[in-house]
Image (cartoon, rainbow, N blue to C red):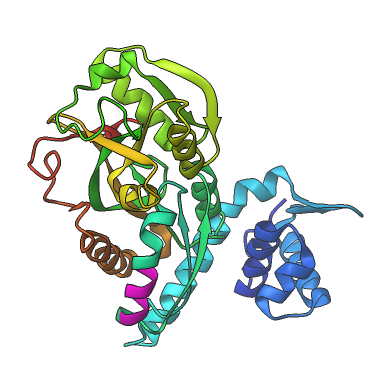
């Protein structure tokens, strides 16, 4: 039974959070800059003070107990609060300095990273970005577990304790093989998808769900190809090879059409699209800093001319597009 008078030291809580993140004592000790015996001692002291077993360690693996999983979120929140307290105590110390671990989903990362990384290096030279690319659910899990500080993905995330900052909106474009009869068209009806062989990304990609939602809203049952791709680039290559068509976000058009084997067509207004935003743990206490970072990213992406900054889209560049990310 937990001793109600016990006050866990922050070093012990950081040890627990780091072990939970890495599931490896050596990696956790290296992250915290302590010896492995010191880390083990801090964690053992926390478990003794709480009267609970938080971590189970065997000769082959490290895993959290049920109690450890239950308390991890609270431990992360405490560590975030202490970090925020230290930032406040430092006065003018910029919270957007030092290392920031940023996640991005695969249908965003390859298309905005070059512009964003170069731009942030100029705007925020004290910020050291570490980038992680993964699917939405896994990024949210890493965010909740403290392995990430923030993530860029399609909104809404709809996750408890996760703050959301809309950054920009973009339309979906139909990708076609060169020479396709619809190539270059500007006012396609989504209903035409019923007559086209539609290629989708694998399960877990939000763009797959959004493509299916385009069809659902248009009231059509598309001809879904058995071919499925793990990345948007692979899907595009299948389109170039004549296996079907697919939907790509506007920010991907320049990159994916550069080789010359891909044609595109635009949907009629209102055009389907999605809203991209920055998400973060509300417990971090860094909402204002992340809003500033989100504004920087939105401006850098919008400079490319393919997107509409958040707050100006009631539906695309002409005010009539339909945002499909309100339901995920």
Magenta residues, dominant SS class: helix
Q: Is residue 195 left or right of residue 142?
A: left
Q: Let me know if residue 5 appears in the view.
A: yes
Magenta region, residue range: 116-122
Question: Is residue 120 magenta-colored?
Answer: yes
Residue 3 seen by the camera: no
Q: Residue at x 64, y 74 (%)?
A: 11
Q: Eyeballing the image, is 132 above or below 28?
A: above
In the depicted view, which residue is nearer to us: 36 or 41? Answer: 36
Name the residue rendered at 32%, 13% in the picture.
195
As drawn, 214 above or below 204: above
Q: Is residue 184 above or below residue 3?
A: above
Front-most of residues 62 and 15 = 62
Q: Is residue 291 left or right of residue 160?
A: left
Q: Residue at x 33, y 87 (%)?
A: 91
Q: Quadrant of residue 325?
A: top left
Question: Which residue does the image show at 80% across and 72% down from the upper left?
Answer: 41
Residue at far front of view:
179
Q: In screen coordinates, is 103 left or right of 312?
A: right
The single residue placed furthest to the right in the displayed view is: 59
> Whole-percent x and y of residue 77?
49, 60
Quadrant (top left/top right/bottom left/bottom right) for the C terminus? top left
Which quadrant of the figure has residue 263? top left
On the image, the x and y values in percent for residue 297 come to 30, 64
Image coordinates of residue 280 in percent, x first then y, are 40, 57
Name the foreground residue: 5 vs 89.
89
Residue 271 is inside the magenta segment: no
In percent of width and height, residue 305 lies at: 19, 57
């Amino acid at each position: 039974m937990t001793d109600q008078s016990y006050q866990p030291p922050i070093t012990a809580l950081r040890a627990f959070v780091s072990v939970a993140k890495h599931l490896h004592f050596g990696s956790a000790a290296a992250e915290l800059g302590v010896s492995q015996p010191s880390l083990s001692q801090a964690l053992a002291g926390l478990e003794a003070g709480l009267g609970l077993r938080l971590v189970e360690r065997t000769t082959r693996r490290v895993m959290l107990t049920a109690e450890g999983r239950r308390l991890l979120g609270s431990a992360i929140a405490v560590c975030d609060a202490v970090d925020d307290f230290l930032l406040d105590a430092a006065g003018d110390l910029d919270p957007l300095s030092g290392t920031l671990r940023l996640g991005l989903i695969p249908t965003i990362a390859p298309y905005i990273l070059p512009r964003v990384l170069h731009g942030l290096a100029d705007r925020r030279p004290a910020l050291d970005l570490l980038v992680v690319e993964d699917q939405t659910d896994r990024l949210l899990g890493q965010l909740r577990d403290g392995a990430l500080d923030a993530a860029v993905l399609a909104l809404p995330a709809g996750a408890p304790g996760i703050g959301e900052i809309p950054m920009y909106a973009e339309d979906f474009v139909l990708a076609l093989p060169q020479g396709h009869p619809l190539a270059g068209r500007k006012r396609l009806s989504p209903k035409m998808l019923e007559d086209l062989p539609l290629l989708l990304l694998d399960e877990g990609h939000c763009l797959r769900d959004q493509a299916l939602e385009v069809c659902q809203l248009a009231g059509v049952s598309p001809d879904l190809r058995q071919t499925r791709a793990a990345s948007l680039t692979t899907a595009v290559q299948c389109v170039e090879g004549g296996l079907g068509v697919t939907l790509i976000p506007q920010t991907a058009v320049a990159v994916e059409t550069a080789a010359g084997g891909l044609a595109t067509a635009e949907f009629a207004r209102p055009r389907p699209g999605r809203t991209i935003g920055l998400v973060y743990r509300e417990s971090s206490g860094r909402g204002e800093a992340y809003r500033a970072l989100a504004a920087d990213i939105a401006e850098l992406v919008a400079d490319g001319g393919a997107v509409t900054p958040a707050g100006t889209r009631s539906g695309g560049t002409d005010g009539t597009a339909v945002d499909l990310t309100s339901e995920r």
